[in-house]
Each structure stands twice: as C-alpha cells, then as structure tokens.
Amino acid sequence: MARRAGLRNLITDVGGLKVGNSADGKIKSGCTVIVCDAPATAAVQVLGGAPGTRETDLLEPHNTVEAINALVLSGGSAFGLDAASGVQAALREMGVGFEVGNQRIPIVPGAILFDMLNGGDKDWGRYPPYRELGYEAVHSASLDFSLGTTGAGTGATVAGLKGGLGSASTVIDNGSTIGALVAVNALGMVTVGDTRHFWATPFEIADEFGGLGLPHPMPEIAADVRTKFSHASGAANTTIGVIATDFILTKAQAKRLAISAHDGFSRAIWPSHTVFDGDLIFALATGTSGRAPEIGEFIDLCASAASTMARAVARGVYSAIPAENDPYPVWRSLT
C-alpha cells in the first residue's frame, strides 16, 4: 500500500469538508469545527475513561439519524460543550439541518478536552465564551487552516510539552483520500523518552514533523511510563479527533473506521486511552468518491486511518507556538 499525503496534507483533502478555528488568547482556549458541504455519514468511538460529549448516542449504527452537518472539538472541559450551540445557530441561519416538517435542525455532535489549568484566565463571568467561539468558527471555515496553537488545540498540553491542533491526509493506492484532525491534549508523551523524536515517526511522510527518524540507539527509558502526573495535574487531559474518508460508508463501517483510527493514538502517544483521558474519535464518510470500498480496500482504509491519525498527532505538537504563562515548553524549543 503506497502512501503519499494529499495536496494540503489536511483533513480538507477529503472532498466535502471545511474546517474553521476560533480562539480566545486570554483564556487560552478555543474550538474547531468541521462543516460538511452535504450531510455526511458519521460514527464515534470512545476509548478514554473521562469523555465529555454531545449528541454521540445518535451516531450509533442502530439509531435513526443517518448523517450529520458538522462536528465540534472544543477546549473548556464541560463548559466547551456550548460551542456546538453556536455552530448550530450559524448553520440554522444558513438553512442547514435535518428536515422535520417546516423546521431544519442542524445535527452537530461534539467533544471537549480539559484545558482549564493551562495558565489562561478562566474568569469569564456568568457565561463561558464557547457558544460565540463556535459561531465564529463556522464563519471562518475553509479548505486551508492553521495547525498547532489554534482552535481546540490553543491551550492543549501533553506530558512535558505544549500540545496543539494537528491534521494530516493520505491518498491510498485506489485514489481515495483519508484525513485526520486531532486536538492533542494527552496525559502521556508524544516523544520517545527524553528525546525530540516522535513516537509517530515510522509513519512520517516528507519530514512533516521534523524528519528526525527514531533515536539510535533506542534509549533504555523509552518504555518508561511518564505522564503529566510527573509534572502537574494529571486531570488536565483528553485527545479528541476526527477521521474522514471520501468513500461511501454505512454507519457500521464508519464505526469500524473510528475504532481503527484509535490505533493511531496508541502509535503516537505513550500511554494513551487512560482513565484520565477522554480519548475519542469521530468518523466521517462524505461519499464524494462516488463509491463504496471493496473488502480489501476497507482493510487498507482502516490501516491508513491509524497511520494518518498518528501523523496528525505529531504535527499538532510539532506546530505549537509559545504563549504567556504556558505550563510547558513547545517542541521547537527542545535541543
């Protein structure tokens, strides 16, 4: 299975998707929205022990609604669930949504991460700002968007480093495209031991996160379990992401794709899926390729979901930039 990145090396290389980011530098938090040009088949898989979600039950294959209009990833812990309300408001103004009689109801599942202890000023008054941030994110949605310290990754951290928003894409042999988007805010580490080398290195394409390869020799401490408990609060976590394809998929197939994409977390973050992470991945199938995968193609698609997600994780941390009162340094500051 040959691998190459798409034109932008972003999830928007998958036809039918746009991404918008919004953030508040004072609170050091923000949100990211994926807007579907047409309703897209969706699913979700949660493997972390501390998730925060909205409208995820409807994504199960046995439930009625077949497609969604947008997805939201947000900071702010439970406060950040408000971001989806702002996205709904923007889409309703555009006449987008599930049609029920003479009403249109935008279907907008979402997930949040914990970035409340990152040095930002969370004294926002009576109501948190996430509803307005969600509204703004929809109106900024485009094919091109920034990575690192932006959107849902604005205040993200990992063990010992600043996290961020990452994305990557892969064009597989049959010409179909798979893309990943992730807000990296893990309890664990994304680098090998005390080195600058990313755990996701075996999947790197064209030096997209530094081209350092794996350390040689591999440090003896590489397998040591190091988490934020070694540095600060261990509760400030959760990595949330989206995996997308241009194939036509059923909801059950989308669910399997989301499950497979979690292997990318395991390849890029050590440890992942802990009881203090709310690790979650949504899957989207836009169908813009015009066809469903054959069984062999679906296996390749699921493998690519894992490798593409691993790359997106590393790219998010690689792209982070410093801000005032950061609890951790950025990757680019390491020597």
Image (cartoon, grey):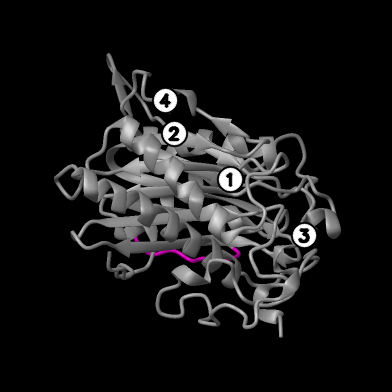
* Residue 52 percent location from the top left of the image: 62, 34
Q: Is 118 displayed left or right of 53 in the figure?
A: right
The label nearer to you, 1 versus 3, is: 3
Mark positioned earlier in the residue sequence (2 or 3): 2
Which residue: 52% across, 75% down? Answer: 209
Mark positioned earlier in the residue sequence (1 or 3): 1
Residue 60 is marked as: 4
How far apart marks 2 and 3 lie (CA) works out to: 35 Å
Q: Which residue is mark 2?
A: 108
Tag 1's secondary structure?
strand
Mark 2 and mark 4 in contact? Answer it, CB < 8 Å: no
Residue 25, placed above or below residue 111? below
Which region is colored magenta? 141-149
Q: Amino acid at mark 3?
A: Arg
Mark 2 and mark 1 in contact? Answer it, CB < 8 Å: no
Q: Amino acid at mark 1?
A: Ser
Q: Name the quadrant of the C terminus.
A: bottom right
Q: Which residue is mark 1?
A: 74
Dot 4: few (<14), some (14–19), or many (≥20) neighbours within 10 Å? some
Dot 1: few (<14), some (14–19), or many (≥20) neighbours within 10 Å? many
